[in-house]
Every structure is written in C-alpha cells, then in structure tokens.
Amino acid sequence: MVGKALQDHFRCPDGLLDFEINRELSRPEGFFQFSSGATCYGRSSSGIAASPEVQLTDALADVSTSNGTVKLTFDPDEVIENLRLERYSKTGWSAYDRVLKNIYYSVRPLTTRSFRRSIQKLRASDWQKASFPRWPVDTSVENICEQLLTLTLRAQNAERIPFVWFWPNGAGGCIVMTHDVEAEAGRDHCLALLDLDDSFGIKASVQIVPEDRYEVSAEFLTGIRSGGHEVCVQDLNHDGRLFDNRGEFRRRAKLINRYGREYGAQGFRAAVLYRRPDWFEDLEFSFDMSIPNVARFDPQRGGCCTVMPYFVGDLLEIPVTTIQDYMLFHLLDERSIDLWKTQVGLILAKCGVASFIVHPDYILEQDTHAVYLNLLRWLKQERASRNLWFALPGEINTWWRARRKMHVVKRGDSWRVEGEGSEQATLAFAQLENGKLVYRQATGANHATPSI
C-alpha cells in the first residue's frame, strides 16, 4: 500500500488515501525536493542528486491526478523511512571519522574537560556550512505529509479529511523534559533538580548509566520514582563504543536489557546520541530517545527530519528535537534560552514534540543554572497560554501506541474516533483555506458530522 506512512501519521479513515507511482523509479537513491521545505532521499523518476547541497529537482512538478488518485514519481513511504532512519547518511561515519573517534575515546580518560571542549568545538566548527538537515529544526517529514494530504484534497475535490488528532485531549503539542546523568556530580544533584522541575509542574525522565560512571543505588532510583518521575537506561558505560561493531553491540545489548529489567525501565537512550536504528531490534525496550531531529553539533551528524514520534519496528522513537544544554553552553557559548524558544516555536507550528536534554552535571554553575531556571519559567508561561501536553516519555509511548490502533469511522451521520483509549482522542479535520492546509479540531471532541 503506497501511503502507509501518511496513514500512520494522520490515522485517516481506511481507504481514503489513494496514491500511485506512475513511472519506473531510478535505480540509485539520491536527493530531491517535494515542494519547498521538504528535502527527500530515495528513488525518483523526476531526477535525483548525489548531494543535498546542490539545486534539487522538485518532484511536485511531475505530480498528476486521475479519478481521485494522486500519481507520484517516488515512493513516499520509502522516502519518509529513509529520512527517519537517516539512510541518506548511511552509517553517518566515514573511515577517517571512525579513526578519529577511536583515538579520541582512547585518550579521553587522560584529558581535561577544557581540552575535550576544545576538541568538540573544533569538530563542530563547520556547523553552519550544511544546508540539510535544516537548522534549527527540520520538518521535511511533516512537510511531505502535508503536501500529500493537500494533493489528496484537491484530487478528490474534498472539503476536508478527518483524522485522529496527534495528542490526547486536543493538545496542540507536547513538551518532554529529560535529564541524562553523566557522572557522580550529576547523580548527586539529580534529586534536587527534580524538585526544581516539580516546583514548575514538570515531571522528567532520568537516564542512568548502569556501569562504571557512578553507583546506582535502589534508594536513588526510588527517589526518582517517588516524585512521579521516570527512570530510563542510558547506554551501558558511556565509553562511546556501543555501536562500533554489531557483535559487541549484541553483547552489550544483553547487559543493557538486563539493567532495563532491573530498573523497571521502558526507555533507552544511547550516550552522545550515537545510533544505528537498524540494530535497535536487539534492545528489549518499548521506546528509544537516541535520534536527533537535526544533529548539527553532535559527533554523529544527520537527523531524522521529523518532530513527531515514529516506530522503528515495534520500538517507538521519541526524537530529540531541541539542542542539548551542553552544546548550547559550551559549543555555542550561549547563556540565553532564545534558541530553545525558536526551536519550540518551529516544533509547535507542526504540532510536534519539543524534547529537551538537560544534564544535571552541566547546570551546577550559577550562570547555566540561571539559564535553566529561565527555561522552566518560560515553559510554565507557555503551558498557561497554550494547550500543551507536558508528558513523560513513557506517557508519550502509551499514547502513541494507542493512537496507532485507533480508527476514524462513520457511524450514522457522524465521524467518530474508535479504539481503546479513544476517550482521550480528538477528531480533527485537514482542509484548505486560501490554498493552505490547516487543521481544525471537531467541536464534539471525538466525533462530528461528516463532510468530504
């Protein structure tokens, strides 16, 4: 079925979306556009390029329609999966980069924090040169989905298309706070940080390194959970080598899975956001939080180009969609929340999830602590002025799995959202207003009179 990714994204009525690939696709994969703001990677009969840094062919120009069917020159499911799984960057590491990485982690224990920051700044010094993924937020996946739905509305001469709204209770977007504990100082500061989060009405997940970095006591884990926060596993020992080769990954994955069971953790995150999504099948977790939206400052470049959760097999990926505190403070030398605010604005414009990584270790100093306080204050204001869902990763996982099984069906004269958990769901409509796709929630929560 062409268009499965779009169906999964919107949860439209079954059989409503109709796409067809009308030409033989190119054998090699490459880059092209699908309207402005949507960079694609895959096979296309409209023309492809080896790099996203050149003028790209726009496949939108070759779209045609017939009897309600939208005919494309590429497979949207293939393209969306290629973006989400970063297949456009292959493994993300050249042979030269792998050698430098191995040298860095071999000598890292002998270096000072100041020296490591200098190396990291040098590594990230070219961050402004790349055009893809787009900085500071890349929404290529959302833009592709919106363009496909726009084409469907026009091809079917439809007034509107119903779908299951993205978040529970009609929330316009989602905010999730996560804390990765790097060392003993961060562990010792963690519970106080969670108390600070609580004072602003925010619950957070805490990612624990199980081995080598610090002792993980039962009392520490209980202290996290007793406040309504969440425990997740972060890597195995944070040595940067989790994904060096498949055999070693499988060995470590067994230990990581054991710690997950011991901690009662549903979620996982790899240290330094190193990742190989095609290896995730060895992890026995319900969700992962290792793939950034755009990895402009991370050692492993790339990005999933989406601000929505998505499934990698049966593992839910909750992408990291904002810059980490370490990069903000120590690579950009910023002491304001302006970039975070810009990113959140772009994310919420697509009804996405704004996910933060703030390390207890890196907000111990007065200046960085003050920045985090400003972020909490601003998020509290946004919560009061917008209908946003502040959620734990585990809650996002529960909702997204329930939503995946919901359906929009016609019962009598009304559209309804049905399925387990649909009492929290909101029926919405995609429609064109002045030629632009907009979303409108139904006034009757999860049901409304049909009109398509």
Image (spheres, helix red, strand yellow):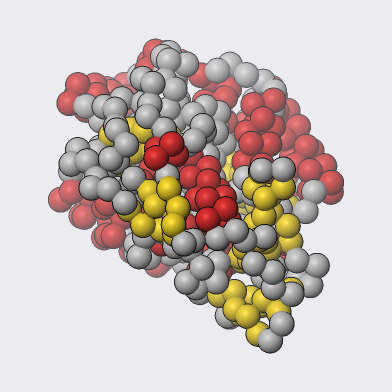
Kindly tell me whether residue 289 is visible in this rendering: yes
**Residue 302 location (% of width, % of height):** 38, 33
* Quadrant assignment for the C terminus: bottom right
In front: 409, or 290?
409
Q: Is residue 336 above or below residue 273?
A: above
* Quadrant assignment for the N terminus: bottom left
Q: Is residue 216 above or below residue 375?
A: below
Q: Is residue 340 above or below residue 107?
A: below
Location of residue 240 (image quadrant): top left
**At x 37% / y 29%, what residue is drawn?**
57
Residue farthest along the front direction in this orientation: 67
Kindly tell me whether residue 184 is visible in this rendering: no
Q: Position of 250 compared to 138: left or right? A: left
In front: 399, or 283?
399
**At x 65% / y 85%, what residue is drawn?**
411
Total number of numbered labels? Answer: 0
Residue farthest along the left direction in this orientation: 247
**At x 19% / y 21%, what residue is drawn?**
96
Residue farthest along the bottom direction in this orientation: 412
**At x 60% / y 48%, what residue is drawn?**
352
**Residue 316 location (% of width, % of height):** 44, 59
**Residue 185 location (% of width, % of height):** 54, 36
Q: Is residue 185 above or below residue 75?
A: above
Location of residue 60 (image quadrant): top left
Q: Position of 276 compared to 136: left or right? A: left
**Residue 230 location (% of width, % of height):** 57, 59
In front: 49, or 22?
22
